[in-house]
Amino acid sequence: MRTTFSERPAMFRSNPFGFIFSVLLIPLGVGIVILLVWYLKCLSTRLELTGNDLVLTKGLLSKDRIELEIDGIRTVRIYQSFMNRIFNVGSVSVFTAGDLPEIEVVGLPDPHELRELINRKQGE
């Protein structure tokens, strides 16, 4: 199986003001903890489009993995605030049969590329 899309949430680009605020808090000792937890959260989340499956993997020590077949995806919703549009990141929600999203990822770089790849795979 060939991976056509593989991304992790971006730290700075998804929340630049929060990142700068955390850096300013480093002298107090709180900022380094915030940045470390944030970094580990971003590091432990990966969204991949592999073959005919969309795979979300979360976790460092214990793993949570959600796999969806491309054919079963009904809707891909992308939300970008003004700042998100400037930095080309966004929140991606993937819906199948229900009203609640099966997969949600916040701060994903270039979310429109993922939506286009899913649409292209569904058209094949």
Image (cartoon, rainbow, N blue to C red):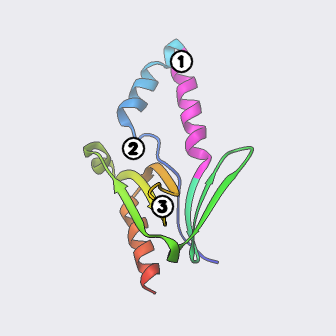
* Residue 124 placement, left or right of 112: right
| Magenta: main secondary structure | helix
- Residue count near mark 3 (Cα–Cα under 10 Å), binned few <14, some 14–19, many ≥20: few
Neighbour tally class for label 2: few under 14, some 14-19, many 20 plus, Cα within 10 Å: many
Disc 3 element? loop
The extreme front residue here reads 98
Query: Is residue 15 a member of the stretch shown in magenta?
Result: no
Element at badge 2? loop
Q: Which residues are magenta?
A: 29-45
Where residue 67 sits: x, y (%)?
61, 65
Q: Nearer the viewer, residue 52 or 10?
A: 52
**Residue 1 locus on image (x, y percent):** 64, 78
Query: Disc 1 marks which residue?
Result: 30
Horizontal and vertical percent position of residue 116? 38, 71
Q: Amino acid at mark 2?
A: Arg
User: What amino acid is labelled 1 in the image?
Assistant: Val
Q: Alpha carbon of mark 3 to alpha carbon of mark 1: how far?
A: 40 Å
Question: Which residue is depicted at the point 58% across and 24% down?
Answer: 33
Q: Which residue is mark 2?
A: 13
Q: Are marks 3 and 1 in contact (CB under 8 Å)?
A: no
- Depth check: give the residue in front, 58 or 110: 58
Which residue has dot 3 on it? Answer: 98
Q: Which amino acid type corresponds to the residue marked 3 in the rendered image?
A: Gly
Please indicate whether residue 69 sits to the left or right of residue 92 in the image: right
Q: Is 38 included in the stretch rendered in magenta?
A: yes
Q: Distance between the Cα atoms at labels 2 and 3?
A: 31 Å
User: Is residue 12 or residue 119 the one in the foreground?
Assistant: 119
